[in-house]
Every structure is written in C-alpha cells, then in structure tokens.
Image (tube, rainbow, N blue to C red):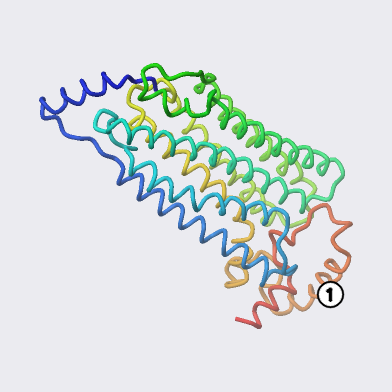
Amino acid sequence: MKCRLELKVTKNLTESVCNRPIRDKSGQYDAMNLSMGVITAFIVIVRLLYKQFWSYQRKLAYDDWAIMWTVILGIPCTVINTAGLTAHGLGRDVWTIPPATLTLFVEYFFIIEVIYLAEMAIVKLSLSLFYLAIFPGKTIRRLLIATCVLNVLYGVAFVTTGIFACTPVSRYWTQYVEKDSAGYCINLNLFAWVHGAFNIVLDVWMIALPLSQVKSFQMHWKKKFGVIIMFLMGTFVTIVTILRLQSLIYFSNSTNPTWDNWIIGWWSTIEVNVGMICTCLPTLRLMLVSVAPRIFSTNGSRNGSNCTANTHDSSQRYSNGLRNKPFDLSSIEMSAVEEQRWGNSV
C-alpha cells in the first residue's frame, strides 16, 4: 500500500477531468457491519442471560466468560468500522480522499486489525473451553488443554506482532502519505497469510477433536447425527477464513488501499461474527428446546410417560456430576427434568 501523494493528486485530477463516476461501496459495508454486529451481540447476550438465570447450572462457565470478551471487543469494533473506516474512505478510491483523512483511515484500520486478531483467538479459546467442559476423557482433555494453551499463545503472539509490525509503530499509517517516512515494517502480506493459514489449520483441528469422540457417544443415532451436525457448523468459519485469505492478495501492496481493503474488512467482520455465533449454537439449541420441546427435543421426554420414566435417571445423572459418562450432554441436550421444569413454567 505504498502509494505516493503525488500519484494520488495526479489520479484525482485525471478522474475529475474525464468525468468518471466516483465509486463508493461504504453503504454496503455499513449495512453488513451494523446488522452482523447487532445480531451477534444479541445472540451472545441472550446466551449469557440464559446460562446465568435459566440453565440447569445457573452460572457462567469459562467459555461464557471468554465469549463475553469478544462482545466487549466487538461493540467498539462495530463502531470503529463505521465511524472510523467507512467515514474516512473505506469503499472509495484513495485519490478522492485528502491526505489527512487517509492517515486517519489507516490508523483506524490498524486498531481494527489488532482487535480482529484478539477476537479470533478468544473465539477459538471459548470453543476449546466448551469442549473441555463436555469431554471428561483423559486423552481428549489433555489434547483440549493443549489446544487452549495454544490458543492463548497464538493470540498473544499475533496481537503483539500486529501491534509492533512497524518500527516505530506510527510508520504503519505515516508511510502512505509521507514520502520519506522513517522506520520499517515487517512483510505485512506474509504476516496476514501466516495468520490466515494458522486459523484454517486450527479450525480443522478443533473440528476433528470433537468428531473423534462421536463413536463413544451413548445415544440414539438420530441424536448422534444432530451432535455431528452441530460440531460441523464450525466449517462455516473455516470457509469464511478461506474467502478472507483470497482477499489478502493486495493487502500491503495496494496503490488503492481504501478501495482494495474493503473486501478484507468485509470478510474479516463476517469471520469474527460467524465464529461468535457458532460458539453460541449449543446454547441456542437448548433455548429452542426450552421454548418448544415437542419440536426441537430429541429426548424421550416428548411424551408424558417417557418424561416420568426418565426423571429419576436424569436426576441421578446430575447428582453424580456426570463423572462416569463419556460425554456431558448437559451443555447441548436438555434433560427430561429440565424439559419438565420448563414445560411447567411456559
């Protein structure tokens, strides 16, 4: 993105003289950003409220606290996307933007990039902690603990590198408008590609881990199939990550950064929000079961006799803390006791 101010001025004059239309995709970006931000924040907040006040445990688990931090980071990210990026040129050609505005644009882009790196690490950490809570087997737990540690190290490493990618840090945004900006930057294209590739590998690993445990699930095949589908929902994030990776071709080499980085911001925003939504799917399913158990439940408690028959078993299962079970269904499957309690309250 090493465009010179003189080239910008010349290009601006050429476009003006030729009467060419001004391109502007900022409206599309704002619509996507605000809608995704509001929907994701709503889903996460509802998840947290459900876990705290209406779930069987009635408390937030470690994965809930982790996903809460993504919302804390996501809200200012949504605001900066609109008030910082599109308001200062994202989605428009760079030669239509004043130098001072371009500098502000890159400063906001820098902030968004750091937040994005942190959010992606926390989303993956939240999912790892969720798996850690439902799989009691020694081998899988060791792998999941290692994955949690890897996610933390991965987040710290990439966030730190993202912040100090340029020396001094200010060179990240001054290089675009100052002809002889002092300092240097690492290969930002390589950094972005390494991060994207690492994300994909980690996604595949975190999908493979729970799927490797499916054969040990003691449940009806229909219920087992539903759990597999839930785990495979994570592939949506991987697909978006791949699409984002394709958009990085011109990341640090563009002569039109405000236009070319539009697609990077687009897929990055979708990637983070889809990741957050996917981590909430198990809780959303429990909520749907609680509202309409006859439609969404796969338990035998769909009829009264089965509900009565399973009440003692479910109570005993919870009293034993599920320690002897290969899989803790309480995080994704509502017990007969819970369904009966919800049925009496709605």
Badge 1 density bin: few <14, some 14–19, many ≥20, Cα 10 Å: few
Task: For mark 1, give the secondary structure.
Answer: helix
> 292 above or below 63?
below
Question: In the rendered image, which residue does mark 1 sit on?
Answer: 312
Q: How many marks?
A: 1
**Residue depicted at 40% across the width and 16% down the height:** 180
Q: Position of residue 85 (x, y in %)?
A: 38, 41
Picture quadrant where residue 337 is located: bottom right
From the image, which quarter does the C terminus lie in?
A: bottom right
What percent of the width, then of the height, locates residue 70?
58, 50
> Taking 172 as reference, is 56 left or right?
right
Give 220 or 258, whichever is nearer the viewer: 258
Of the 4 image quadrants, the one containing the N terminus is: top left
- The quarter of the displayed image where residue 147 is located: top right
**Residue at 47% across, 33% down:** 244
Residue 195 placement, left or right of 261: right
Amino acid at pointer 1: His
Q: Is residue 331 above or below residue 174?
A: below
Q: Nearer the viewer, residue 32 or 204?
A: 32
The residue at the point 69 percent across, 53 percent down is 63
